[in-house]
């Protein structure tokens, strides 16, 4: 089994918007796909775990590897401010257990990890600055992955004769 992911942006026309339902049964906007690439699930999982490993092994990655223990750290308002806690260890467990059905879900949880730190910590603080740096690193790795998968997909189409000839 593989995953399809969009390689083009959604249409801005409201009439072309599709809706799908998540596990929580809330309607979610679905990106209209101009064309998609099929990626084997095992390959996608492996690539995402590589990105996570880079983040977790980063010199500041330890800050985000485990859930925030608000009690131990004395952050009494943490769960009032942060409604959806997330950490890289949880993302890794979810990836290993097949929780993510798309790259977007994976990306959203990694962003949530860093955005939570950015929201909770004062601008200019050490944790705030590290979170911004790590989010930028993730964004670069994620965008590189998308480009790599797109290139590999196009190369595969050429090899299989599925590409259009001019």
Image: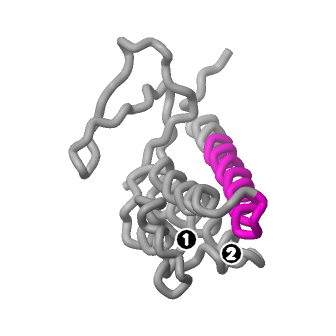
User: Of residues 33 and 104, which is closer to you in this image?
Assistant: 104
The colour scheme used to paint the residues is: one colour
Callout 1: SS: helix
Residue drawn at x 64%, y 58% is 118
Quarter location, residue 99? bottom left
Magenta stretch: dominant secondary structure: helix
Q: Neighbour class for label 2 at 10 Å: few (<14), some, many (≥20)?
A: some
Q: Which residues are magenta?
A: 124-152
Q: Please tell me which of labels 1 and 2 falls first in the chain.
A: 2
Q: Could you tell me residue 133's position as x and y percent?
A: 76, 60
**What residue is disc 2 on?**
61
Asked whether, in this view, residue 40 is left or right of residue 53, the answer is left
User: Of residues 148 and 55, which is closer to you in this image?
Assistant: 55
Callout 2: SS: helix
Asked whether, in this view, residue 91 is left or right of residue 126, the answer is left
Quadrant placement of the N terminus: bottom left
**What residue is disc 1 on?**
88
Q: Neighbour class for label 1 at 10 Å: few (<14), some, many (≥20)?
A: many
Residue drawn at x 50%, y 72% is 92
- Residue 9's tag is none
Q: Could you tell me residue 83's position as x and y percent?
A: 41, 59
Asked whether, in this view, residue 82 is left or right of residue 152, the answer is left
- Check contact, mark 1 vs mark 2: CB within 8 A: yes
């Amino acid at each position: 089994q593989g995953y399809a992911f969009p390689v083009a942006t959604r249409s801005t026309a409201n009439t072309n918007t599709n809706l799908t339902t998540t596990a929580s049964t809330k309607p979610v906007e679905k990106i209209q796909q101009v064309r998609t690439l099929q990626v084997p699930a095992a390959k996608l999982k492996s690539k995402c775990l590589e990105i996570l490993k880079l983040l977790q092994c980063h010199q500041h990655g330890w800050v985000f590897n485990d859930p925030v223990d608000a009690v131990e750290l004395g952050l009494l308002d943490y769960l009032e401010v942060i409604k959806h806690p997330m950490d890289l260890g949880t993302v890794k467990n979810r990836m290993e257990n097949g929780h993510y059905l798309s790259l977007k879900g994976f990306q959203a949880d990694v962003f949530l990890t860093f955005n939570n730190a950015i929201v909770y910590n004062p601008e200019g603080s050490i944790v705030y600055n590290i979170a911004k740096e790590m989010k930028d690193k993730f964004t670069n790795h994620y965008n590189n992955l998308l480009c790599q998968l797109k290139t590999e997909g196009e190369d595969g189409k050429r090899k299989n004769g599925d590409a259009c000839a001019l």
